[in-house]
């Protein structure tokens, strides 16, 4: 059985924050933006967004730095139902510093497993993070 290698530690507040975030009831899109602090090699909470949209989140992402997004999305189904999938999105733009990309890539699987999020997506550009892209990905679930 293959094991995941953890390059960076996870700040002790991150799992607590995500647990609270997971069980929050909201009819709007919410997100947690996580980053790796390269000095301490620790995953930390950078920002929390309430009642937001994908385009606003896209505008908040740095163009040359990776990020992890924990997204509580509101999906409207064709039969009138609503669901609230919890998504783990890893964005690693082309052209970011290789050592930073390695820190994120080496921590991604362990972080996702620790947070117990199954909807796991990856992007190479913040520009590709759109509502259409996310809806297409969620159609597989």
Image: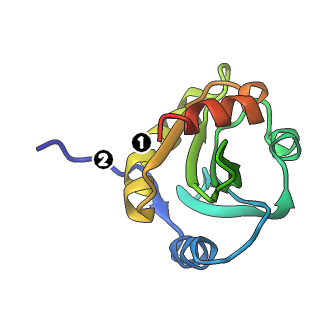
Question: Which residue is at a point 73% across and 30% down the rendered structure image?
Answer: 132
Question: Which residue is at a point 63% across and 28% down the rendered structure image?
Answer: 97
State the scheme by which the image is colored: rainbow
* 40 vs 126, nearest the viewer: 126
**Residue 100 drawn above or below residue 81:** above
**Residue 10 drawn above or below residue 2:** below
Element under label 1?
helix
Horizontal and vertical percent for residue 35? Answer: 65, 53
Element under label 2?
loop
**Residue 127 drawn above or below residue 50:** above
The Cα–Cα distance between marks 2 and 1, rounded to whole angstroms, is 6 Å
Drawn side of residue 49 relative to residue 45, left or right: right
Is there CB contact under 8 Å for labels 2 and 1? Answer: yes
* 109 vs 135, nearest the viewer: 135
Question: Which residue is at a point 37% across and 57% down the rendered structure image?
Answer: 113
Residue 101 found in image quarter: top right
Label disc, if present, on residue 5 of the rendered structure: 2
* Dot 2 crowding, Cα within 10 Å, few <14, some 14–19, many 20+: few
Horizontal and vertical percent for residue 127? Answer: 78, 26
| Chain-order first, disc 2 or disc 1 | 2
What residue sits right under mark 1 in the picture? Answer: 106
Label disc, if present, on residue 35 of the rendered structure: none
């Amino acid at each position: 059985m293959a094991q995941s290698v953890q390059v960076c530690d996870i700040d002790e507040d991150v799992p607590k924050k995500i647990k609270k975030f997971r069980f929050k009831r909201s009819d709007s899109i919410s997100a947690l933006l996580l980053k790796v602090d390269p000095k301490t090699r620790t995953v930390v909470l950078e920002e929390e967004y309430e009642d937001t949209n994908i385009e606003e989140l896209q505008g908040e992402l740095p163009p040359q730095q990776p990020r992890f997004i924990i997204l509580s999305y509101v999906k409207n189904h064709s039969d009138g139902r609503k669901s609230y999938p919890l998504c783990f999105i890893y964005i690693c733009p082309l052209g970011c510093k290789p050592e930073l990309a390695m820190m994120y890539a080496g921590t991604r699987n362990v972080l996702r497993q620790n947070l117990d999020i199954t909807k796991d997506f990856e992007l190479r550009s913040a520009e590709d993070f759109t509502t259409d892209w996310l809806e297409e990905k969620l159609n597989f679930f």
